[in-house]
């Protein structure tokens, strides 16, 4: 069930968006709950981060969309925001408040559907799976989002988190089966990398959350493609 | 009786040779009345050949003459039947000669091995020729374009193929004559191997030369396209400049206290110019140019256009490369949406976004299902595949030259093109 908030002052435009959302939900068998707001002020007042997606009109009388987005970001840095606007020019500034996209009025269904599809892929990917690693004495539960990369050296497998690393036993293949598809990729037969931590690729080296790892020749192309697709869907 | 055998052998051998010539002639353009010509030239070539049959002598030159004229008659035959230059005729005759020599050597070898001597096995001969022709046809002729033979190829063909057969024949005849029969097997075997390799290399070099030509042609087309893109970029920059100048002047007029109708007119004009001011401001000039150009094109063709682009990290790229990559990608997207039946689906969306120390460029559009070919790139549906299909290939090449990559995806009716580029500091 997806909770979607719409901030739009024009009656007609609001109805249109709601209609499109229902149509999309119907075509893709999704359940949605839409909460409308008639102005930026209303959206921001008493805002709680319960939404999966926000559609915000930029041109609103009391508080415009950019301002509203800026305020919301302070308490909710993660919620995907799609701006609705009359003028495409303002769209580039959308990056400043972390908007993922925008649509231009009058909104057409197909343009809207394209953006919505992307937003939904992003939302789905946000679910982080937990992995359970058996240790010598007990086990340890880690969210996949905390893992930078996993390294295998002979039979020893080291899990590198943001601040620490620990050693476990196991195989990379088993881990690959457990994580969210598309989120991890191997740059080398001994490294399984969490793509959200990839910040640079230079020649044969990939920088993963501060550490530089070597890409093997045969795996490089496929790894780069995995990074590209990850960045395309979830990247930031 | 022996003479009759030899005569028949020669006539038959020549006949096979002419058939071989016709095999290698297949990629060439035939002259009118081909069948008639073939018959006439065939007979004439016999004339040429027999005219110069000389009795065996110790002089190598005299010894070689029949062989040379044998081959030359093939050149004459080819020229008579097809529209081609001397080089192509020489090449065909040389290949046919080699083939004929290979076949007859193989036959003699088998004859010697199985039946120990000179006897007639027409059926075996026919089979050997048949197999060889089939092999050559399947591997070479079927896929061959009309022969374009450079001088070096035709000369080396003659210089390699003819001497092999002449020398070996001379040596074998000498061995037979001086009674060293045992060596004949070895000599014939070696002759066969050499001739096969010689023909193989001749044809391989030809194929390689042809692919080089193709490559050169593609490179030239790409160069032309690149020049076009550079010009387009220049034009866009100038239009942009003019628009800014105009806006500045109009603002100046407004500031001077324009009122009423004048002011209205000015606002109207500003509105018109604003359309051209779909000018992107992404932080990178080349990106601005290609996005603005595409925005205008889309507007002219009624295609929906959305763009969210931060080009600030792209400074390390050669502007022409960037313009070419994005230009190609966007051209493809526009073509794809124009082919859609539902005009509402004609939408192109562009995102350019920094990710860490990399930049992601993405183009999304609705599209009909594309066919992907073996190299992972979509097959073009444009009439001239050489012009259009290589657009995606060139995007990939440019991306990879910067250490980046190109990915393509098609899901739920939407085609997504993504380019990832590591940034140069």
Image (tube, rainbow, N blue to C red):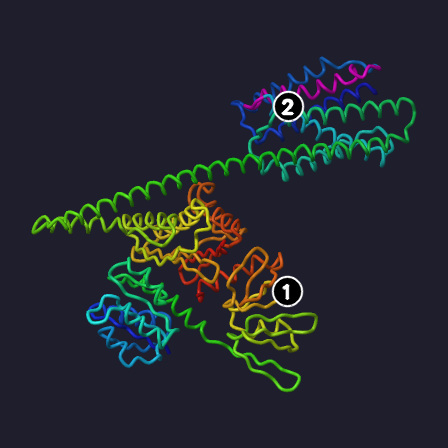
Q: Report the residue that reaches farthest toward the left.
A: B260
- Asked whether the viewer can see residue B124, the reply is yes
Query: What residue does disc 1 label?
Result: A189
> Viewed as shown, does residue B24 lie left or right of B323?
right
Main SS, magenta region, reads helix
Q: Report the residue that reaches farthest toward the bottom.
A: A138
Viewer-nearest residue: B366 or B111 = B366
Q: Are marks 2 and 1 in contact (CB under 8 Å)?
A: no
Write down the quadrant of residue A43 in the picture.
bottom left
- Asked whether the viewer can see residue A31, the reply is no
Residue A142: x percent and y percent?
54, 79
What range is drawn magenta here?
A: B58-85
Residue B402: x percent and y percent?
51, 51
Viewer-nearest residue: A12 or A236 = A236
Asked if B59 appears above or below B409 in the picture, the reply is above
> Viewed as shown, does residue B294 lie left or right of A216?
left
Read off the chain for label 2: B
Q: Residue at x 77, y 18 (%)?
A: B64
Q: Secondary structure at mark 2?
A: helix
Asked if A40 appears above or below A227 in the picture, the reply is below
Viewer-nearest residue: B86 or A13 = A13
Q: Residue at x 41, y 63 (%)?
A: B412
Q: Residues within 10 Å of mark 1 (few under 14, many from 20)?
A: few
- How far, Cα to Cα, is label 2 from label 1? 56 Å
Viewer-nearest residue: B242 or B377 = B242
Query: What residue does disc 2 label?
Result: B90
């Amino acid at each position: 069930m997806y909770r979607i908030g719409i901030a739009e002052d024009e009656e007609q435009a609001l109805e249109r968006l709601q209609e499109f959302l229902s149509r999309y939900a119907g075509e893709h068998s999704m359940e949605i709950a839409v909460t409308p707001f008639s102005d930026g002020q209303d959206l921001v007042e008493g805002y709680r981060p319960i939404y999966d997606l926000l559609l915000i009109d930029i041109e609103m009388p009391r508080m415009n969309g950019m301002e509203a987005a800026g305020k919301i970001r302070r308490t909710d840095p993660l919620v995907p925001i799609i701006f609705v606007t009359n003028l495409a020019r303002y769209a580039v500034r959308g990056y400043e408040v972390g908007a993922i996209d925008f649509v231009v009025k009058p909104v057409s269904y197909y343009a809207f559907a394209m953006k919505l599809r992307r937003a939904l892929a992003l939302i789905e990917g946000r679910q982080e799976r937990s992995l359970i690693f058996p240790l010598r004495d007990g086990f340890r539960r880690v969210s996949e989002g905390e893992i930078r990369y996993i390294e295998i050296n002979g039979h020893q497998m080291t899990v590198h988190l943001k601040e620490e690393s620990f050693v476990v036993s196991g195989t990379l293949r088993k881990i690959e089966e457990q994580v969210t598809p598309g989120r991890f990729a191997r740059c080398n037969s001994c490294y399984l990398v969490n793509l959200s931590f990839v910040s640079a690729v230079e020649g044969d080296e990939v920088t993963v959350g501060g550490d530089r790892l070597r890409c093997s020749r045969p795996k490089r192309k496929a790894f780069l493609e995995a990074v590209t697709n990850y960045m395309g869907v979830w990247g930031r | 009786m022996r003479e009759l055998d030899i005569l028949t052998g020669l006539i038959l051998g020549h006949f096979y040779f002419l058939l071989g010539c016709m095999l290698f002639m297949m990629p060439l353009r035939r002259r009118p009345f081909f069948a008639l010509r073939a018959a006439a030239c065939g007979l004439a070539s016999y004339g040429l050949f027999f005219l110069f049959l000389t009795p065996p002598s110790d002089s190598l030159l005299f010894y070689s003459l029949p062989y040379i004229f044998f081959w030359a008659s093939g050149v004459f035959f080819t020229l008579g039947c097809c529209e081609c230059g001397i080089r192509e005729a020489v090449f065909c005759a040389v290949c046919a000669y080699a083939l004929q020599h290979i076949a007859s050597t193989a036959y003699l070898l088998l004859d010697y091995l199985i039946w120990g001597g000179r006897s007639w096995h027409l059926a075996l001969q026919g089979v050997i020729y048949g197999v060889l022709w089939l092999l050559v046809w399947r591997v070479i002729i079927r896929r061959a374009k009309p022969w374009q033979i450079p001088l070096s190829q035709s000369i080396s063909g003659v210089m390699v193929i003819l001497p092999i057969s002449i020398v070996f024949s001379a040596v074998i005849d000498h061995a037979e004559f001086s009674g060293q029969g045992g060596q004949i097997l070895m000599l014939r075997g070696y002759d066969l191997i050499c001739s096969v390799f010689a023909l193989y290399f001749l044809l391989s070099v030809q194929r390689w030369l042809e692919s080089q030509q193709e490559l050169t042609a593609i490179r030239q087309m790409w160069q032309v396209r690149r020049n076009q893109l550079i010009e387009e970029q220049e034009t866009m920059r100038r239009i942009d400049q003019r628009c800014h100048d105009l806006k500045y002047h109009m603002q100046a007029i407004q500031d001077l206290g324009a009122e009423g109708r004048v002011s209205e007119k000015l606002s109207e004009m500003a509105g018109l110019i604003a359309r051209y001011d779909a000018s992107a401001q992404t932080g990178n000039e080349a990106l601005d140019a290609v996005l603005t150009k595409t925005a205008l094109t889309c507007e002219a063709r009624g295609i929906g256009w959305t763009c969210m682009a931060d080009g600030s990290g792209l400074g390390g790229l050669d502007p022409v490369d960037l313009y070419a990559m994005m230009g190609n990608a966007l051209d493809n997207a526009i073509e794809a949406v124009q082919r859609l039946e539902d005009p509402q689906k004609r939408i192109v969306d562009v995102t350019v976004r920094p990710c860490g120390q990399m930049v992601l460029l993405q183009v999304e559009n609705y599209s009909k299902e594309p066919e992907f070919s073996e190299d992972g790139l979509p097959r073009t549906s444009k009439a001239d595949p050489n012009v259009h299909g290589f657009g995606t290939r060139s995007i990939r090449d440019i991306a990879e030259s910067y250490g980046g990559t190109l990915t393509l995806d098609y899901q739920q009716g939407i085609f997504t093109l993504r380019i990832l580029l590591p940034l140069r500091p």
